[in-house]
């Protein structure tokens, strides 16, 4: 109880980079809309977007005795979305560290440069 759990995913669209890049950006935009609408679907939830920029999303959703920290990053140069989700029951045994969203999102972007050569920003 109260331990942070983690899930990480990389979603890559094959084919034309211009189209895959559009889809990656749309996926992050749709995710932001879903988090904003979360309270309409789940009235007991408490969603908050802490970063909402084109291709960069971070948010916190509290619901019942659980809290979710969600990070999404789209890299249109390589048609990829990276997701990092961390959740825990409340109160977590280890409090969430005070880390700026940009640090987390930038750290998620760095390995994509190695994985997809020539796509670095």
Image (cartoon, grey):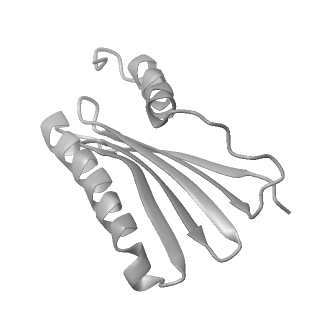
Task: Return the x and y of residue 80 as percentages of the image width and height.
Answer: 34, 39
Q: Is residue 23 above or below residue 90?
A: above
Query: What residue sits 26% from the left and 55% below the top?
Result: 29
- Left/right placement of residue 113 relative to residue 19 reads right
- Looking at the rendered structure, the number of numbered marks drawn on it comes to 0
Q: Nearer the viewer, residue 117 or 32?
A: 32
Q: Is residue 32 above or below residue 120?
A: below
Q: Residue furthest left?
A: 18
Task: Return the x and y of residue 60 as percentages of the image width and height.
Answer: 52, 57
Query: For the N terminus, which image quadrant?
Result: bottom right
Task: Return the x and y of residue 12 as percentages of the image width and height.
Answer: 36, 42
Query: What residue sits 19% from the left and 35% below the top?
Result: 17
Query: What residue sits 62% from the left and 36% below the top?
Result: 98
- Left/right placement of residue 112 relative to residue 64 reads left
Query: What residue sits 47% from the left and 37% below the top?
Result: 101
Task: Return the x and y of residue 24 as percentages of the image width and height.
Answer: 27, 46
Q: Nearer the viewer, residue 89 or 83?
A: 89
Q: Quadrant of residue 67?
A: bottom right
- Left/right placement of residue 114 relative to residue 20 reads right
Q: Is residue 70 above or below residue 105?
A: below
Query: For the C terminus, which image quadrant?
Result: top left
């Amino acid at each position: 109880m109260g331990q942070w759990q983690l899930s990480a995913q990389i979603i890559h669209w094959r084919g034309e980079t211009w189209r895959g890049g559009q889809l990656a950006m749309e996926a992050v935009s749709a995710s932001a809309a879903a988090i904003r609408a979360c309270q309409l679907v789940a009235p007991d939830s408490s969603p908050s977007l802490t970063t909402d920029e084109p291709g960069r999303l971070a948010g916190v959703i509290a619901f019942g005795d659980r809290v979710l920290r969600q990070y999404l990053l789209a890299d249109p140069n390589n048609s990829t979305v990276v997701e990092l989700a961390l959740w825990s029951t409340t109160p977590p045994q280890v409090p969430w560290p005070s880390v700026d969203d940009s640090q987390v999102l930038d750290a998620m972007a760095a390995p994509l440069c190695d994985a997809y050569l020539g796509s670095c920003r």
